[in-house]
């Protein structure tokens, strides 16, 4: 993991007071997800917290992009007129590499076929202050996990597999990091079950299902 950045240290320093305030406001303990969301709330006093209806305004700690959908994100950012990214951001060149003939040959083919794309991404990253992970430097799943998965943080990233670096479920790599993205390990597991003709059971995905009295199972109780 890379060194903890100043904004993350500031987040940690402010977190105890914010969580204590939220417990008093809600009148109950907080779940892990609630702790992370409360800690990243833009304005706690102005924010409404009605479950299922509230739209949260949050401060994001980091953004991660990949080399396919990341191109569109960069184009949109360029149209915004901003000179630099507002939060630490990285773009990872791994999706345009097709696994066909072996690592070395696949990488050479991707660099040859997508040279124009890589040059654009590299120059845009340099201009706007994004970290650039060149082709062959690793897949986004593992790079983000090893370098940027800091406990208690909030990250926006591309694609269903990026929550591999965090997420809420026990199947994710680090259950203390909240990642925003579509899907995750649990969805993939359900899909595999259905493809093989076995209906996924509720206990297969370990969802925090409430008991008949409204309480949570012991392993899901907030502290």
Image (spheres, rainbow, N blue to C red):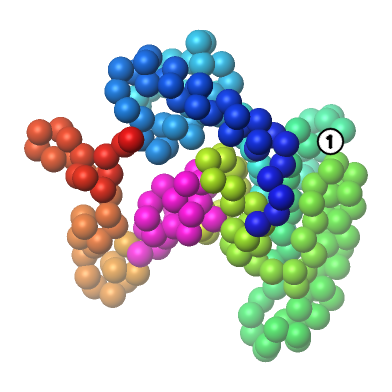
Q: Give the left or right position of residue 114, taking residue 19 as reference.
A: right
Q: Which residues are magenta?
A: 165-189
Q: Give the left or right position of residue 89, taking residue 34 as reference.
A: right
Query: Where 176 sits versus 7, above or below?
Result: below
Query: Where 216 sits versus 37, above or below?
Result: below
Give coordinates of residue 1: x percent, y percent.
Answer: 65, 57
Residue 158 seen in the current view: no
Instruction: Please say whether residue 184 is one of the residues in the magenta stretch.
Output: yes
Residue 199 seen in the current view: yes
**Quadrant into which the C terminus falls:** top left
Q: Give the left or right position of residue 96, taking residue 134 as reference.
A: left
Give coordinates of residue 179: x percent, y percent.
Answer: 52, 46
Mark 1, other Cα within 10 Å: few <14 / some 14–19 / many ≥20: some
Instruction: Please say whether residue 147 is one of the residues in the magenta stretch.
Output: no
Depth check, front residue: 1 or 65: 1
Which secondary structure, mark 1?
Answer: loop
Depth check, front residue: 110 or 31: 31
Give coordinates of residue 182: x percent, y percent.
Answer: 48, 49
- The residue depicted at 48 percent of the width and 59 percent of the height is 173
Magenta span: chief secondary structure: loop
- Toward the top, the furthest residue is 45
- The residue depicted at 75 percent of the width and 33 percent of the height is 86
Q: Give the left or right position of residue 133, taking residue 185 as reference.
A: right
The residue beneath circle 1 is 84
Query: Where 113 sits versus 160, above or below?
Result: below
Depth check, front residue: 50 or 96: 50
- Toward the left, the furthest residue is 212
């Amino acid at each position: 993991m890379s060194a903890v950045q100043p904004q993350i240290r500031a987040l940690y320093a402010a977190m105890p007071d914010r969580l204590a305030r939220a417990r008093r406001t809600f009148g109950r303990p907080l779940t892990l997800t609630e702790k992370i969301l409360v800690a990243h709330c833009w304005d706690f006093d102005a924010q409404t917290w009605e479950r299922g209806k509230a739209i949260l305004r949050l401060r994001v700690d980091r953004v991660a992009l990949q080399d396919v959908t990341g191109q569109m994100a960069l184009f949109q950012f360029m149209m915004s007129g901003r000179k630099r990214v507002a939060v630490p951001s990285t773009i990872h060149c791994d999706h345009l590499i097709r696994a066909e003939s072996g690592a070395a040959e696949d990488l050479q083919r991707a660099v040859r076929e997508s040279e124009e794309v890589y040059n654009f991404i590299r120059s845009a990253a340099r201009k706007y202050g994004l970290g650039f992970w060149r082709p062959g430097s690793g897949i986004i799943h593992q790079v983000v996990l090893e370098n940027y998965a800091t406990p208690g943080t909030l990250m926006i990233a591309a694609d269903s597999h990026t929550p591999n670096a965090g997420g809420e479920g026990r199947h994710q790599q680090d259950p203390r990091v909240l990642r925003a993205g579509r899907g995750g390990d649990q969805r993939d597991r359900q899909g595999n079950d259905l493809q093989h003709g076995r209906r996924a059971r509720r206990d297969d995905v370990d969802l925090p299902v409430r008991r008949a009295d409204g309480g949570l199972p012991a392993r899901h109780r907030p502290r």
